[in-house]
Amino acid sequence: MTIHAPYPIGTPGTPWGAAEVAAWLSRQTRRRSYEADVLGMLETLRSRYEVVQYGRLDYPSGSYPLFAIRSREWRDELPCALVTGGVHGYETSGVHGALQFADRHASRYAGRVNLVVAPCVSPWAYERIHRWNAEAIDPNRSFRENSPAQESAALMQLVAPLRDRVLVHVDLHETTDSDESEFRPALAARDGVAHVPGEIPDGFYLVDDSEHPQPAFQQAVIAAVAKVTHIAPADARGEIIGSPVVAPGVIEYALTRLGLCAGITGAPYKTTTEVYPDSPRASAEQCNAAQVAAVCAAIDFALAHGMVKQR
């Protein structure tokens, strides 16, 4: 039997308090630049899109403006497509995939759909390559009323006026080896529960909404991504990250009930992508390309198969 060392912060079995959160925060260091990687790219897009500031994160360790881009030629009669990245700041291809989509592919949808792209929802975490925000809160479990996460609350406020006009929402994520080596053990320690080791899937997969599943939509996205990178197989139990595989490369979560980003709108077509950047079979460029392929396939399917009622 493998014995796992306890997480270095806190007392096993006891949830963290303020002292433990402070100890955890003291270990987080800035490792890359939101200004250089994201804001710099947004500047290059200003000539083609409306770049809007929708909030600001204020932490003792830094202040971060939050930006999204919108179609410059916005037409109220068109449906909306929402793309979100960097809800978990360490999931790099979500951020860069969203930016690459806006830079290289979004123009083909002009006059067909209004685009809203929030490429880096969690810039503090992006700089520290972390899952949580500066208060040890997971933004992707915090998309709910009176959200405890500044990142989640700001994005919900941005999207609120469009909530019932969104046709398709693609939320870009990664599943990494660090989920098992750092983030899941940290979560268990924070919550005062035992860490149960899991298995990291090798490949791309999607998370559908168990309350409003769209299997044909998910499979269209999987088919497009399979041309770019490999799709994660089910494990020996027929699962991916503990959830039953309902179709090749697809699992389901109750998106809204769990407070997940992909559940923040009434979009009939929604999905969460999961890229595996640590695979020996995938490069960083492939991971970004997989995210872009997923976004394009999702919008293409949604435009071909359904519309939302406009208010």
Image (spheres, rainbow, N blue to C red):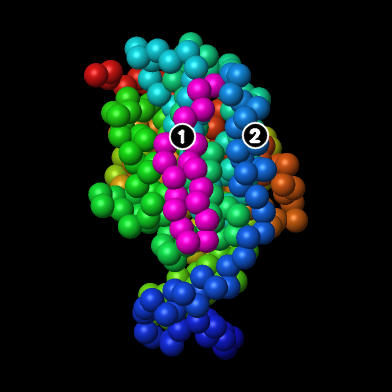
Position of 251 compared to 157: left or right? right
In the rendered structure, which disc, 1 or 2, sits on the residue that comes first in sequence? Answer: 2
Determine if residue 245 is in view. Answer: yes
Relative to 101, say whether 171 is above or below. below
Spot occupied by residue 47 in the image (x, y as percentages of width and height): 60, 19
69 inside magenta stretch? no
Task: Residue at 25%, 49% (x, y): give it.
Answer: 145
State the separation of the CA atoms marked 1 and 2: 15 Å
Q: Which residues are magenta?
A: 49-67
Q: Which residue is mark 2?
A: 41
Relative to 245, say whether 135 is above or below. below
* Residue 53: assigned label: 1
Relative to 301, say whether 249 is above or below. below
63 inside magenta stretch? yes
Please tell me how crowded label 2 is: few (under 14), some (14-19), or many (20+) other residues with Cα within 10 Å. some
Position of 3 compared to 307: left or right? right
Spot occupied by residue 166 in the image (x, y as percentages of width and height): 36, 28
